[in-house]
Amino acid sequence: MARHYSETEVVAILEDLDPARLHAFVAAHVVTPVVTSQGHAFTEADVARLQLLCDLSDIYGLPTDALPMVMSLIDQLNTARGDMRALIQAVASEPDDVRGRIRRSVRQLRIVTLGQG
């Protein structure tokens, strides 16, 4: 079972995070903790996401109201990466002739796409 952290634990783990900032991130829906009878519970992925949010805000000066859009783009990119990994594995498991047809098709599509630009 995945480990969950309380609000107090998360604030203690992340030095750039205080309770007000944590509540602002939750209110902005850029992190979605599990709601329990003891309050919010955060997964390790939530903790990593909160660190990224702090970094985006502090290091890169990203305003809080821009965080939902940026995090949505990051989530989409991560999903696309996972899809691409799965597709590569699926193609790799196909016979040589199928992989060759896919390779030629991809090459042709790239030429067509580049030719239209």
Image (tube, rainbow, N blue to C red):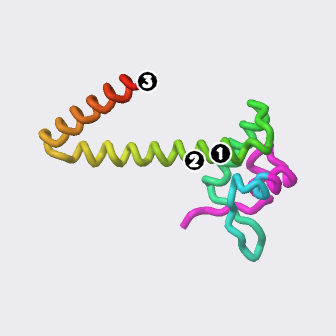
- Of mark 3 and mark 2, the one earlier in the sequence is 2
Question: Residue at image x 73%, y 37%?
Answer: 55
Provide residue 45's location: percent of width, then percent of height. Answer: 61, 53
- Which quadrant would the C terminus be assigned to in this image? top left
Residue 11 on the magenta span: yes
Q: Which mark is residue 71?
A: 1
- The residue range painted magenta reads 1-24
Amino acid residing under circle 1: Met
Amino acid residing under circle 2: Asp
SS class, disc 3: loop
Query: Could you say which quadrant of the image residue 81 lies in?
Result: top left
Q: Which mark is residue 117?
A: 3
- Residue named by callout 2: 75
Residue 33 on the magenta span: no
Farthest bottom residue?
37
- Measure the alpha-carbon separation of dots 1 and 3: 29 Å
- Measure the alpha-carbon separation of dots 1 and 2: 6 Å
